[in-house]
Image (cartoon, rainbow, N blue to C red):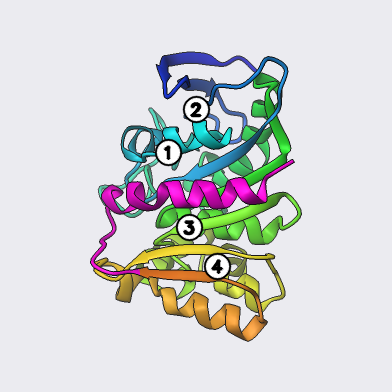
Amino acid sequence: MALEKLISSRADGGMQEVYCHASTSTGTDMTFSVFVPPHPPGSKLPVLWYLSGLTCTHANVTDKGGYRAACAEHGIIFIAPDTSPRGEGVPDVDVYDFGQGAGFYVDATEAPWATHFRMRTYIETELPALIAEALPMADLSRQGITGHSMGGHGALTIALRHPDRFRSVSAFAPIVSPIRCPWGQKALSGYLGEDQAAWRAYDACALIADGARLPDLLIDQGDADSFLDEQLKTGLLAEACAAADMPVTLRMQPGYDHSYFFIATFMPDHIAWHAERMKA
């Protein structure tokens, strides 16, 4: 599968790059960013996936996430895909929380979204296979995943569906139960239809209640986040983990909001946490 390199810049001793390729999952061109830290020739490095939130592209975390110095220190490849298919012929609506920029990491089944909005397959299957082929230094036996908001929802649900794939899982201000918040109800009904049984595969709390488990989990959530009570509902995840006796480190951060200032503040902690769990 051909990759077009859009950006290649030296940063923190490594290389920050952005690629575009024709996706078989979405039927569109997809763009993602990759930071490869400095490393000895022939060495293999663990991979940390970062999934972005509503309205974002790969560029938000690439420009504002504050991850490169920590990834260079710990020797971790950092990969940030887009949040949805885009382009001519891709359906959209004039709202920020549905359509382009708001793929919710699901495989849509409802028209007109089902043709292109196949972000679950893209993130879980197509992009890892592409990385394995294109980046020989990437050690996909050592993967971690994290994300913010809608991307935190994606990170949690993907990891819970594939617990053997990821050595480490974290999230920044994740949507923990889309079934029980307006963002999620809008997205899941629009992409998947009204049968809520189909929604459970995309809800972290429901997956845990249905038996999915992770060995541990790190969550940072700002207590000044304007979306906390209505959309994120972090307490529901704490309750689900307690009921399942599943370990979680949930850190409520005083005074922090939903922005990339919050993410950049705690990103080095998350990378160090992932690094400890992704050691050879």
- Residue occupying the point 62% across, 49% down: 276
Using a 10 Å C-alpha cutoff, classify the residue at mark 3 as few (fewer than 14 neighbours), some (14 to 19) or many (20 or more). many
Q: Position of residue 132 (x, y in %)?
A: 70, 27
- Magenta segment: 253-280
- Disc 1 + disc 2, Cβ < 8 Å: yes
Pointer 2 or 4: first along the chain: 2
| Residue 22 point in image, percent of width and height | 55, 22
Could you tell me if the residues under marks 2 and 4 are in contact, i.e. CB atoms within 8 Å?
no
Q: Earlier in the sequence, mark 3 or mark 4?
A: 3
Secondary structure of residue under mark 2: strand
Classify 274 as above or below 76.
Answer: below
Q: Which residue in the protein does label 3 denote?
A: 171
Q: How many marks?
A: 4
Mark 2 → mark 4, Cα distance in angstroms = 29 Å
- The label shown at residue 35 is 2
**Callout 2, which amino acid?**
Phe
Determine if residue 29 is in view: no
Disc sitting over residue 201 in the figure: none
Three-letter amino acid code of the residue under disc 1: Tyr
User: Is most of the magenta stretch helix, strand or loop?
Assistant: helix
Question: Which one is nearer the viewer's eye here, 55 or 91?
Answer: 55
Give whichever of 238, 190 is nearer the camera. Answer: 238
| Quadrant position of the N terminus in the picture | top right
Q: Position of 91 compared to 202: left or right? A: left
Rounded to the nearest angstrom, the CA distance separating label 3 from label 2 is: 19 Å
Label 1 to label 3: alpha-carbon separation: 14 Å
Residue carrying label 4: 203
